[in-house]
């Protein structure tokens, strides 16, 4: 059964999407399909535990919008995600904050 995201998480992600859209014409075509298949929480979980750095993460960092990343959402709403997802999100954002290029 799909875990239902909180209204606060959904609102946070919608706002992040609007902020990102205001700065770029880049559109993610894969994540919406992931949400359709697994639900929002599971789709984000899968991105977090993947060893790959996602194009959307790179785009947000490039635009100085780290707070618009899924990683930021995971850390802002930690009770909605697994420990593994939280650790991955924290690691990626820490690397960026330390100036390490991912």
Image (cartoon, rainbow, N blue to C red):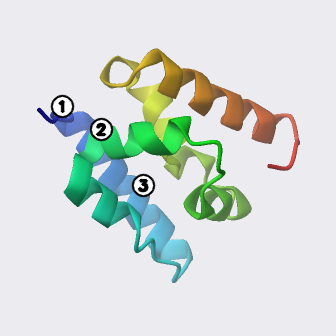
Instruction: Kindly identify the residue that appears in the image at 62 percent across and 48 percent down.
Output: 66
The furthest residue to the bottom: 25
Q: Describe residue 34's horizontal placement relative to residue 24 as left or right.
A: left
Q: Tell me the SS state at disc 2.
A: helix
Instruction: Kindly identify the residue that appears in the image at 21 percent across and 59 percent down.
Output: 36
**Vertical placement of 57 versus 77: above or below?**
below
Which residue is under mark 3? 16
State yes or no: discs 1 and 2 in contact (Cβ < 8 Å): yes
Residue 91 picture quarter: top right
Which residue is under mark 2? 41
Locate residue 13, reporting x and y percent: 35, 49
Between disc 3 and disc 2, the foreground one is: 2
Q: Earlier in the sequence, mark 3 or mark 1?
A: 1
Instruction: Kindly identify the residue that appears in the image at 60 percent across and 56 percent down.
Output: 54
Q: Which mark is residue 69?
A: none
Q: Describe residue 45's horizontal placement relative to residue 32 as left or right.
A: right
State yes or no: discs 3 and 2 in contact (Cβ < 8 Å): no
- Image quadrant occupied by the N terminus: top left
Residue 51 picture quarter: top right
Locate residue 93, reporting x and y percent: 68, 36
Residue 62 picture quarter: bottom right
């Amino acid at each position: 059964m799909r875990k239902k995201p909180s209204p606060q998480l959904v609102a946070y992600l919608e706002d992040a999407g609007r902020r990102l859209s205001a700065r770029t014409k880049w559109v993610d075509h894969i994540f919406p399909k992931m949400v359709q298949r697994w639900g929002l929480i599971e789709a984000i979980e899968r991105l977090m535990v993947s060893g790959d750095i996602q194009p959307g993460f790179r785009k947000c960092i490039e635009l100085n919008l780290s707070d618009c990343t899924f990683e930021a959402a995971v850390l802002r709403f930690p009770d909605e995600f697994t420990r593994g997802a939280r650790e991955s999100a924290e690691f990626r954002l820490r690397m960026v904050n330390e100036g390490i290029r991912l």
